[in-house]
Image (spheres, rainbow, N blue to C red):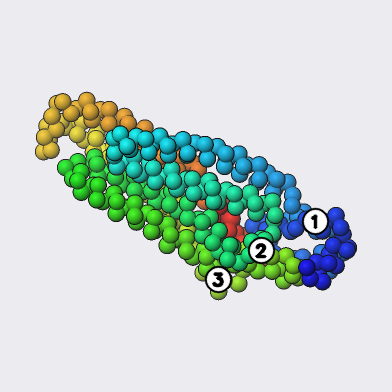
Amino acid sequence: MNASEKLWKMKDPVVASETVQDHRNLLDWTETSLDNATQHKLPINMRFNEGHQLSIIVYSILMVFSAIANTTVLVLIVKRRRKTPSRINTMLMHLAIADLLVTFLMMPLEIGWAATVSWRAGDAMCRIMMFFRMFGLYLSSFILVCISIDRFYAVLKPLYLRALDRRDKVMLTGAWVGATLCSIPQMVVFHVESHPNITWYLQCVTYNVFPTYAHELAYLLFSMIMMYALPLTVIIFSYAAILTEICRRTRNPYGADSITRSSLGFLGKAKVRTLKMTIIIVLVFFVCWTPYYVMCICLVMYLPLSSRHVCHIRHDTMQE
């Protein structure tokens, strides 16, 4: 404990047990001077507050629900794969694993961080946890892309089923490698830094990493495209093409592809199943992510130039 912290505890023993809020809500570190911090109670945005309490409650509920749901799904899929191995079951298994990574790595991090407010795990853990904070999210999005592409080829290229098995292995490997590569920059931009005035306060931040605001904006856009825009585009295109093809075959059962009458019933059922899958996958992905990214775009686009320092910390908010 250094002299600054000792002085802080001597001045206000009640506030001494509290730590300032993390960089996601602290707009500017320089707004709080050491003199003010030691002579007055810290402002609400620099102490454990109701926002942190709400965050802990929400993440805890989500963690329990997600753990139960995804573990159940994973167990059922593993049992099903033993009886009837299939490509889609393999991909759903990887998707459940990705969701469990988010459940047991990102959510506990958010709960613990909200409880302590400041970062207390050191620089190495800061970089490692920021990597895993994004890894599961990227992986989940990329596996959804793999599922969409697999369904696309299964319907439009049904004669290449053997090639699909090899292609799916390549796609799943690419999803894991891609998620790793996209998450590595987190280990570079995040680091532990002390408050410039309250030197005993440490936080895992992105300060002093990006040369200009344009560089940080480019990184934000990259994350948005890779995690949201690109996967959503592929999902919509793939299932739109599937529905179009099924409708075409249904209307023209004796076309060049020689679809027989016996297959018409299958096409009708496939059309319904594909339509349901399309609605579920696209709507869930769209509804869960679109409001969040719209808010982030508004923060970036409409933030006053004089307050651009806020954007340098919003990067972390946009990655949750």
Q: Which amino acid is tagged 2?
A: Gln
In-front residue for pair 152/295: 152
Q: Residue at x 24, y 50 (%)?
A: 166
Could you say which disc has been placed on residue 17 in the image? Answer: 1
Q: Residue at x 33, y 38 (%)?
A: 81
Q: Is residue 53 left or right of residue 169?
A: right
In-front residue for pair 125/237: 125
Which residue bears the numbered disc 3?
A: 210
Percent position of residue 258, x then y: 11, 35
Which residue bears the numbered disc 2?
A: 203
Could you say which disc has been placed on residue 125 in the image? Answer: none
Check the image and report above or below for 194 versus 92.
Answer: below
Mark earlier in primary sequence (2, 3): 2
Can residue 267 be seen?
A: yes
Q: Residue at x 45, y 53 (%)?
A: 138
Mark earlier in primary sequence (2, 1): 1
SS label for mark 2: strand
